[in-house]
């Protein structure tokens, strides 16, 4: 996949960016270089390679020093919601912002 200058100007318009000619050319070069890398990665045959759940699996049996997953803060929902203008079923109610 290769982008053109018109693709860059369309992307810039959608992103509401103002790119001058030199920035547009630089962006075109960088994005096309990125897509070239993606194409090279897709060309690698990965059949039979099992995906890793975690990068440390490549090192071996390493016990990660993680703290226990326990709640360390008390539940203060009611205290936090006392100052809210409108609360229902433990949720903050806010005005509708999308019509």
Image (tube, rainbow, N blue to C red):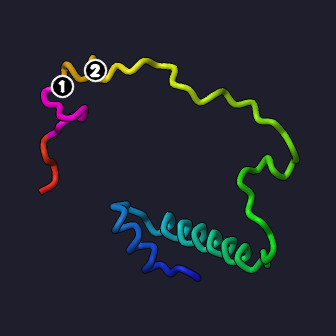
Residue at left 84%, top 52%?
A: 58
Q: In terms of image quadrants, where is residue 46?
A: bottom right
Relative vertical location of residue 21 with respect to residue 1 in this rendering, above or below:
above
Q: What is the secondary structure assignment of the residue under circle 1?
A: loop
Q: Mark 1 points at which residue?
A: 84
The magenta span reads 85-94
Residue 70, position as x, y percentages in the image: 56, 26
Residue at left 66%, top 72%?
A: 38
Residue at left 64%, top 27%?
A: 68
Q: How many marks?
A: 2
Q: Mark 2 points at which residue?
A: 80
Q: Residue 2 carries which label?
A: none
Residue at left 39%, top 67%?
A: 12
Q: In which quarter of the image is the C terminus?
A: bottom left
Q: Is residue 89 magenta?
A: yes
What secondary structure predominates along the stretch shown in magenta? loop
Q: Are marks 2 and 1 in contact (CB under 8 Å)?
A: yes
Residue 91, position as x, y percentages in the image: 24, 35
Q: Does the magenta stretch include residue 31?
A: no
Residue 94, position as x, y percentages in the image: 16, 39
Q: How crowded is mark 2: few (under 14 residues within 10 Å), some or many (20 or more)?
A: few
Relative vertical location of residue 90 with respect to residue 53 in this rendering, above or below:
above
Q: What is the secondary structure assignment of the residue under circle 2?
A: helix
Residue 4, position as x, y percentages in the image: 50, 81
Of residues 90 and 10, the one nearer the viewer is: 90
Residue 53 falls left or right of residue 15: right
Q: In which quarter of the image is the N terminus?
A: bottom right
Relative vertical location of residue 45 with respect to residue 94 in this rendering, above or below:
below
Of residues 42 and 52, the one nearer the viewer is: 52
């Amino acid at each position: 996949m290769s982008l053109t200058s018109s693709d860059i100007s369309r992307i810039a318009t959608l992103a509401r960016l103002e790119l001058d000619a030199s920035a547009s050319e630089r962006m075109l070069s960088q994005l096309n270089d990125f897509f070239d890398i993606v194409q090279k990665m897709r060309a690698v045959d990965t059949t039979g390679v099992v995906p890793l759940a975690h990068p440390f699996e490549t090192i071996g049996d390493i016990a990660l020093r993680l703290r226990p997953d326990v709640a360390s803060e008390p539940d203060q929902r009611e205290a936090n919601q006392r100052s809210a203008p409108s609360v229902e079923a433990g949720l903050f109610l806010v005005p509708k912002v999308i019509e």
